[in-house]
Amino acid sequence: MEMSVAGQKESIYGTTLSGLRECMQEWRQPAYRAAQVLEWLYAKRVEGFAQMSSLPAALRAALEERFEFATLEPVRVLGSEDTTRKYLFRLGDGALIETVLIPASPALYGETSDRRTLCVSTQVGCAYGCKFCASGLDGWSRNLSAGEIVGQIVRVEKLSGERVSNLVFMGMGEPLANFKNLQPALEILNAPWGVEIGARRITISTSGLAPQIRLLAELPMQVRLAVSLHGATDLVREQIMPVNKKYPLAQLLEACEYFAQRRKQRITFEYILIRGVNDRVEDAAALVEVARRVEAKVNCIPYNTVEGLEWERPEEAQQDAFMAVLKRGGTAATLRREKGHDIAAACGQLRRQTQVERGQGPA
Ligand code: SAH
Ligand code: SF4
């Protein structure tokens, strides 16, 4: 369990079953009380200890004293039912993060699919400074606590009245740079006593932190891994992703192979298509080679323009030519032409826009 900052309470949403059992022991309460607290939280979804009516008053008071219901205050919601909905949350210290709810696309999953994917943030800002990304523009402020990560799911489910079926860690921040809080959050999100989302329905996206990819391979749960590749050679990749200097392609691909073999799982390479940077046919040919080596699937996404950045998405004809090379090379690849421009879809954009509008400027 994460230690609380002096004078601050821990978030109850960052607390695991074993963490609560320790509390019960300390408070000389029977162990089953821990499971009872979690049932109130995740099965009944109450938002205060006072409502946990099956608990003795003294225990409720002890819980109240140690824990808080981390407040994620929705400051803006964009989009509506049936479309992608984007939530801008204010955290306890005033920091802003984004969480995006994406309904099933009927074209991909059929009219009756109740698949709902939530895209969550793991940090305030990002230290990795990929040159095309809005999240990294203002640098890194802090890690989200486990409670703030889990809180996004609980909050969106409450606000929307819908259950989330799939999770992608593709919001603001680099999840694997916040491994210590990501790990308990994943446990809580996956556990039958917690949010209970199947591990195979959880995808962690990383810009390529090779050592942490190996750590992720050792977790007891089968979460999926997506790697933001965006370049299939060091030359292309290091132009847009400074992290490639620290973990060059060879080292990254070794870690990917390790993960894929150890987990017996196909990983996904995310590849945003940026005009004139990584969208030539020779880039596609290099991508075929890299994907073959790791036996990875490839997910191509035309770049979403970010205000203040000069990058653009390629023409559709160029996108098609790129995809044709992948297809001929036998790469399992998809092209996701999302219509997200209107609600500032790419990660970090809504927060940035809001800060600019409020004259707060970069954090
Ligand atoms: N830090 C992690 C997860 C968050 S970013 C990572 O980099 O993987 C999630 C994905 O959004 C990454 O693949 C990232 O490269 C992509 N992305 C960032 N800015 C984008 C933009 N303007 N258009 C399209 N995709 C973008
Ligand atoms: Fe950070 Fe990911 Fe954006 Fe790169 S793409 S700056 S790693 S959030």
Image: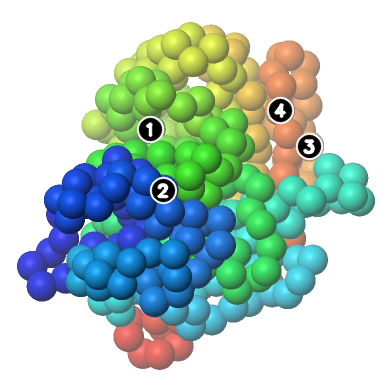
Q: Which residue is mark 3?
A: 320
Q: Is the CB atom of the residue marked by disc 2 within 8 angstroms of ligand 1's nearest atom?
A: no
Q: Residues within 10 Å of mark 2 (few under 14, many from 20)?
A: some
Spatial distance from mark 1 to mark 4, Cα to Cα? 20 Å
Please name the residue that numbered disc 2 is placed on.
35
Going from the N terminus, do you reach mark 2 or mark 3 first?
2
Residue 83, quarter of picture? bottom right
Q: Quadrant of residue 248?
A: top left
Q: Residue at x 10, y 73 (%)?
A: 7
Residue drawn at 66 percent across, 47 percent down: 165
The amino acid pointed to by label 4 is Ala
Q: Is residue 283 above or below residue 315?
A: above
Specify few, some or many for label 4: CA neighbours under 10 Å numbering under 14, 14-19, or 20 or more: many
Earlier sequence position, callout 4 versus callout 2: 2
Identify the residue position indicated by label 1 in the image: 208
Judge depth for marks 4 and 2 and give the one in front.
Answer: 2
Q: Quick one: label 3 or label 4, which is nearer the N terminus? A: 3
Front: mark 1 or 3: 1
Q: Give the percent coordinates (x, y) of residue 215.
A: 31, 25
Q: CA distance from mark 1 to mark 2?
A: 37 Å
In the image, is the residue at mark 1 within 8 Å of ligand 1 by its beta carbon?
yes
SS at mark 3? helix
Taking the image as drawn, is residue 141 in sight? no
The secondary element bearing badge 2 is classed as: helix
Name the N-terminal-most of marks 1 and 3.
1
Secondary element under disc 4, as helix, strand or loop, is strand
Of residues 135 and 283, the one nearer the viewer is 135
Of the residues under marks 1 and 2, which one precedes in the sequence? 2
Q: Amino acid at mark 1?
A: Gly
